[in-house]
Image (cartoon, rainbow, N blue to C red):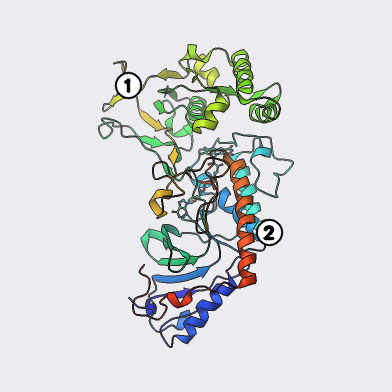
Amino acid sequence: MSMDYYNTRELQGKQSHDPYFIDKMSNKSSSSSSSSSSSSSSASSPSPSPSSRLVVCGPVIVGAGPSGLATAACLKLKGVPSVILERSNCIASLWQLKTYDRLRLHLPKQFCELPFMPFPNDFPTYPTKQQFIQYLDDYATKYDIRPWFNETVASAQFDPTLGFWRVRTTGVKGGDETEYVCRWLIAATGENAEAVVPKLEGMTEFKGPIRHTSLYKSGEDFREKKVLVVGCGNSGMEVCLDLCNHNARPSLVVRDTVHVLPREMLGKSTFGLSMWLLKWLPMRLVDRFLLVASRLLLGNTSRLGLYRPKLGPLELKTLSGKTPVLDVGTLAKIKSGDIEICPAIKRLKPHAIEFIDERTEKFDAIVLATGYRSNVPIWLKESDMFSKEDGLPRTPFPNGWKGECGLYAVGFTKRGLLGASMDAKRIAEDIERCWKAEAKHCTPFKASLFPLSSSSPPSL
Ligand SMILES: Cc1cc2nc3c(=O)[nH]c(=O)nc-3n(C[C@H](O)[C@H](O)[C@H](O)COP(=O)(O)OP(=O)(O)OC[C@H]3O[C@@H](n4cnc5c(N)ncnc54)[C@H](O)[C@@H]3O)c2cc1C
């Protein structure tokens, strides 16, 4: 394949590119007789393939969720334009497309704001999903962030010869390949990129619907049905409550120990109170306080079949990333018997489920609240910064945001939006330093090594 097959596209607008880089590429393009094309000539290029393009740019951010938006905004405020590549057709696709209707932020709004823009005063303490999406839309508008949608990053690899990252995307339905060449690559694909669906024995035999929470919208679809919810994190607990509120009959599989805490204590959010106490007291003492207060407010949860882990909620979160459940009313429904607690599943039968205690019960549907995982190992061709096992940075918080050769991670701290905002600010500061230094010294891009007009261009 020769360079004729590429349509080299410049980035438009304020959120565009490293001018020096583009310049080099354009000069090289125009000097290479008829073979390559720049943005202005791409339409009349002799024989560009409509399905292959080459784009050269400044920082590339993969993912237009809250983390990607926060990073683009922080970079913009430092005068560094960036490009966001997003696989879906909207910002915050997790929130817009994969969450249930009754969802609200689990944490108070002041702990979920993105850098430099608080939530509106008239938003409640726990904004609804729609309000959060509105906030993110306003954020993108305020900072003029315009992600490139329907661009799934299939691979990203550092090219040591060029000294740049080569990021390959595919468009809708796998068509329209584009290769981006950039100095900085920011992974913002999130800890929740792919649904985790466990393999259950007899899964193909079960006759009712089996739905992951990413596809669950409302209990309306399950009215009068007996539904087994698998997984007792925040989503599983809340889905059970939603099912109750829609006159379905939910049961909850609880395999592991779990910390359930009231969402609020002493008129304050449990999360906010914990953060405040941590300023003065050691974590173990704060954990003791949380457990005593929870016992007083919620009672002994182990009597309901919800056994607490040995480590306290904050220590467990710090060491394993496991988030405590903040109760929004589910526990009352468990106490009243509206939600039944079940042990682990042994196997599924056509209309029933057998549990490990040999009990078999009839069920009409299953909801899998079995969580999500990072997809970084699928597309990022490196294994120093990110673990191949869980797709998260190997270096623990707060130092996991920076890798080698201009690689960064935002939103992989297991600390929600607060952690993402911290990462975004650090990344922007770091890139700004290099950006300014490079602009000063004008380190030449090794364009001569990039075979723009040769007969063996980089393969897509
Ligand atoms: C139900 C639920 C409730 C939550 N509530 C809270 C809360 O109250 N407070 C809080 O702080 N956190 C909460 N979280 C955690 C949540 O993950 C973060 O709030 C936030 O969505 C993380 O943002 P992100 O941008 O890192 O990831 P995401 O929001 O997941 O965004 C990542 C983006 O990357 C895109 N992407 C993935 N792979 C590719 C690829 N190969 N190429 C191109 N694009 C790609 C995705 O389409 C997505 O748009 C909640 C999570 C869930 C699931």
Residue 352 seen: no
Choose the circle earlier in sequence order: 2 or 1.
2
Q: Would you name the residue on which mark 2 appears?
A: 77
The answer to which image quadrant residue 198 occupies is: top left
The answer to which image quadrant residue 453 occupies is: bottom left
Residue at the location (64% across, 25% down)? 282
Q: Would you name the residue on which mark 1 appears?
A: 362
Q: Secondary structure at mark 2?
A: helix
- The amino acid type, in three-letter code, at marker 1 is Lys
Report if the CB atoms under discs 2 and 1 are less than 8 Å apart. no
Kindly tell me whether mark 1's CB lies below 8 Å from ligand 1: no
Classed neighbour count for the residue bearing mark 1: other residues with Cα under 10 Å, few (<14), some (14–19), many (≥20): some
Report the residue that reaches farthest toward the bottom.
33
Numbered disc total: 2
Q: Position of residue 331 (x, y in %)?
A: 53, 19
Label 2 – label 1 distance at C-alpha: 57 Å
Which disc, if any, is residue 313?
Answer: none
Q: Is residue 234 above or below residue 425?
A: above
Classed neighbour count for the residue bearing mark 2: other residues with Cα under 10 Å, few (<14), some (14–19), many (≥20): some
- The amino acid type, in three-letter code, at marker 2 is Leu
Q: Quick one: 11 or 284, which is closer to the camera?
A: 284
Which tag is nearer the camera, tag 2 or tag 1?
A: 2
Report the residue that reaches farthest toward the right.
121
Q: Position of residue 177 (x, y in %)?
A: 40, 66
Residue at the location (39% across, 45% down)? 388
Q: Position of residue 441 (x, y in %)?
A: 62, 71
Residue 78 seen: yes
Is 144 situated left or right of 350 in this image?
A: right
